[in-house]
Amino acid sequence: MAFDLDLYQNSTTYSLDSGTYVYGVDWVPMNGNDTETEVVESILIKLKGTGAQILAQVSVWERLLSEAEDYAKTSINQLLRVMIRARLDTGESLYESVVLGGWISWNSRKPQISLVSQFAEITVSVRRQNFWDAVTPIVIPLTNRYATRTTSAIAVDNRDDSTHDNFVTITGTDVLGSLPGATKIEFKNTFNDSLRAGDVYFFLNRRSAPASFQHMIEGESATSGGSTVADANASGGNTRTVTIAATGETTMYYWDLTTTVLDNAKGNLFRIYGSFKGLSSVASTWIKLFISIAGLTILSEGKWKIISGYTGALVDFGTFRLPPYLVDTGSVYPLRLHMVVKTTNSTSRPFDLDYLLLGSVDENRVLRSNGYGLGYNVTLYDDPKNRALYTDGWSSTGKLGNYIGIGDPIKLWPGADSKLYFLWGSQTGSWISKYTATVKISHYPRKRAL
């Protein structure tokens, strides 16, 4: 068996197991565990050459270990990041782990500066993260109504109904490795409009019956409250509109959460977002959601969301456990989801709801625009393994760092079927349910031991 073992920095490979002055290497890979954040690899290297040649070679490795420690402390300059790369056989995939520092010990007498050929033996101790990532990512096959198991970019919508999908499904057997690993997501705005996309939301559902869970609640499906208005640009082809002119608290809509919906939710947490075509911005106005037993007893409620002067179309109603206080027992009693408004004066307030999205928080992330947004045919790249988040594809060549990631990056889990939901707003806050995008997902298989 022939193994490869290198240090790698800024597109340059520095071999530990071969080279002009290396004539022997002894290395047994260390295996980390869940309680450790790092492990130390001990690599015994035998060297042959003049004293100057041996010292120069060792100096290169020492510099890399020193720069790796500096990078681990500052985490700023990507060019300084040092990786240890390895594979146990030439036929295997190459894996790497971030080096956090290290040191070199002389097992033999340190060579003298002379022209005489000498032998030396050192131990290179490499502190690294306690896992290995594949160097080359695997493009994950994606499926929705637009394609089946495609590894090309797949279309997604900013709505979900009988003719649109705002998700992709992922088959667990396509996710390799033994640990949840880094996932690169490429999100491209494909709607030709001068209004740029703004914040982008990712929600990965792997715990709540991803194949069948109803993650969207259409406004027009409300059991009570408001009236349905046709709109071809809305999810489901309709919105639900209501006008409130009373003071105090008033229920605008409520929906029945059926036994099927609650059973599939399995007691997990969901962040609920509302997409509004029209949202009152009259002063002294608040809205919130709560969950009840037949409208009689409140089991769970969110916080009041002030919308006075609010210009956005997406409202974050907070996180709810579904069902509340009952975890995955099956045959759950049906509940109600209410949307209420609170006002302090009788000024007429119109509300026009498109849908509610129940975003699973197994893995969820917000890419927040900090200026300029995402133009037509521009791609937003979220690449956590390389600590890169940027847009590219503008009329002027070059990457633009105009997004900030909030929440941990999405990780795919080996063997776990999942569904990834997408939601996005506009840079100005306007309602954009009709917008479209394409998505491509690559995964870096991760494992604890080589």
Image (cartoon, grey):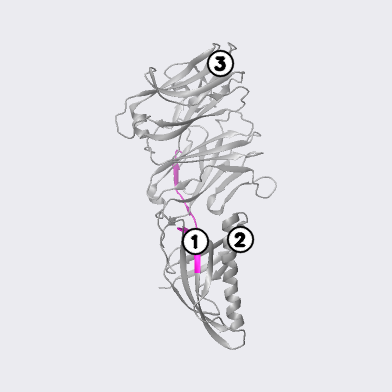
Q: Position of residue 97 (x, y in %)?
A: 49, 60
Q: Position of residue 161 (x, y in %)?
A: 46, 30
For label 3, the crowd category at 10 Å Cα-Cα, with few meaning under 14, some 14 to 19 and many 20 or more, is many
Q: Position of residue 315 (x, y in %)?
A: 54, 28
Q: Which residue is mark 1?
A: 128
Q: Is residue 79 left or right of residue 104?
A: right
Q: Which residue is mark 2?
A: 80
Q: Earlier in the sequence, mark 3 or mark 2?
A: 2
Q: Is residue 174 left or right of residue 250?
A: left
What's the magenta region? 125-145
Instruction: Please name the residue shown 30% across and 32% down the image.
Output: 330
Query: Can residue 191 be seen in the rendering of this structure?
Result: no
Q: Main secondary structure of the magenta part?
A: strand
Distance from Cα at disc 2 to Cα at disc 1: 15 Å
What mark, if any, has residue 165 been given in the picture? none
Looking at the rendered structure, the kind of residue marked 3 is Thr
Looking at the rendered structure, the kind of residue marked 1 is Arg
Magenta stretch: residue 137 in it? Answer: yes
Magenta stretch: residue 126 in it? Answer: yes
Q: Which residue is mark 3?
A: 343
- 127 w.r.t. 229: above or below: below
